[in-house]
Image: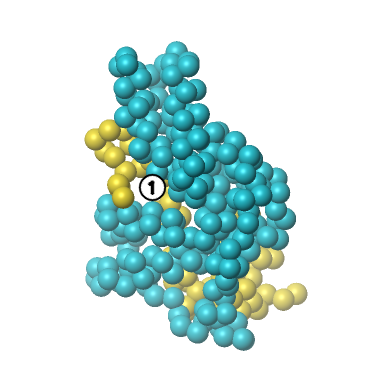
Chain colours: A cyan, B yellow
Amino acid sequence: MNDFARQVEALRPQLIRFARTQLRNDAWAEDAVSDTLLAALEKPQSFAGQSQLKTWLVGILKHKVVDQLRRHTREATLMSDDDGADLDDLLFAADGHWREAPKEWGDPEHALRERQFFEVLEACISHLPGVQGRVFMMREWLELETDEICKELAITSTNLWVLLHRARLRLRDCLQRGWFDAHGASLTP
Amino acid sequence: MKFDLNCKQVTHLVLQREDRSLSWRERLGVRFHLLICKACPRFVRQVELMRGAMGRWKRYGDEAAGGDAPPER
């Protein structure tokens, strides 16, 4: 194996992590990463070294991940009971008021400078129900516009808005319990 | 014209604002509500923190090379 191949191979675990977080399916993630590494090794000359190797590979990976989503559209959009669960009724009374007001999370910099916070964040994303997690990551990581996500997954925009809404509320709830209950406003003067 | 949104409606719009631009009427409704509500401004700050966190999480992964690795599981 030459040096380039070794460097590329060394990044495989990180690529797998990203692919899994997006695809929520280990086999699809393996395929996306293999396709990525193959593409990279086939044309190393397109990596001119002007960007970091990882940035370059992640760029390729994003395309391969979309390929996988296209290939598995039906399964990727199969809603579990969990996907269908709505937090709104837990959060809001019938008159639309908060049942319990949101807590103060304090200065963002307190959380964002902690490596552990990002471990919690990543775990929370991974624990989103499958379809919610996929659309959330398509929006946040693949940075697709909402109409592109609808097109790729063949879902209606009504569906997408509901899924994104639920995903973000869940993430918030998970961060509250996983981080801020212990580290929250107490750190802020 | 109806500007008096309740907290549930406002949270929906605050979350949708992450993914689309609101109409001026929606923006006005949200802004008005945030002036008179004590709870929702906290929700807005939570959403802003999550936005910042996602941005940084993404950059960890896209840019961090070797030594400065992203949080491992």
Residue at the (32%, 73%) spot, across then down: A181
- Kindly tell me whether residue B23 is visible in this rendering: no
Q: Vertically, is B66 above or below B44?
A: above
* Residue A115 at x, y percent in the picture: 27, 52
Q: Position of residue B19 (x, y in %)?
A: 59, 54
Q: Secondary structure at mark 1?
A: helix
Front-most of residues A141 and A154:
A154
The x and y percentages for residue A58 are 45, 33
Percent position of residue A17, x then y? 40, 43
Q: Chain of mark 1?
A: B
**Residue lying farthest right?**
B1
Q: Is residue B62 above or below residue A75?
A: above
Q: Nearer the viewer, residue B48 or A55?
A: A55
Q: Quadrant of the C terminus of chain A?
A: bottom left
Q: Residues within 10 Å of mark 1 (few under 14, many from 20)?
A: some
Nearest the viewer among A3 and A71 is: A71
Of all residues shown, which one is farthest toward the front? A27
- Left or right of residue A157: residue A58: left
Q: Where's the N terminus of chain A, which quadrant? A: top left
Tag 1 residue: B56
* In-image side of A167 versus A146 (left or right): left
The residue located at (63%, 56%) in the rendering is A78
Residue name at image x 47 percent, y 70 percent: B43
Rendered view: A63 above or below A175:
above
* Residue A71 visible in the picture: yes
Q: Amino acid at mark 1?
A: Arg
Q: Residue at x 32, y 54 (%)?
A: A119
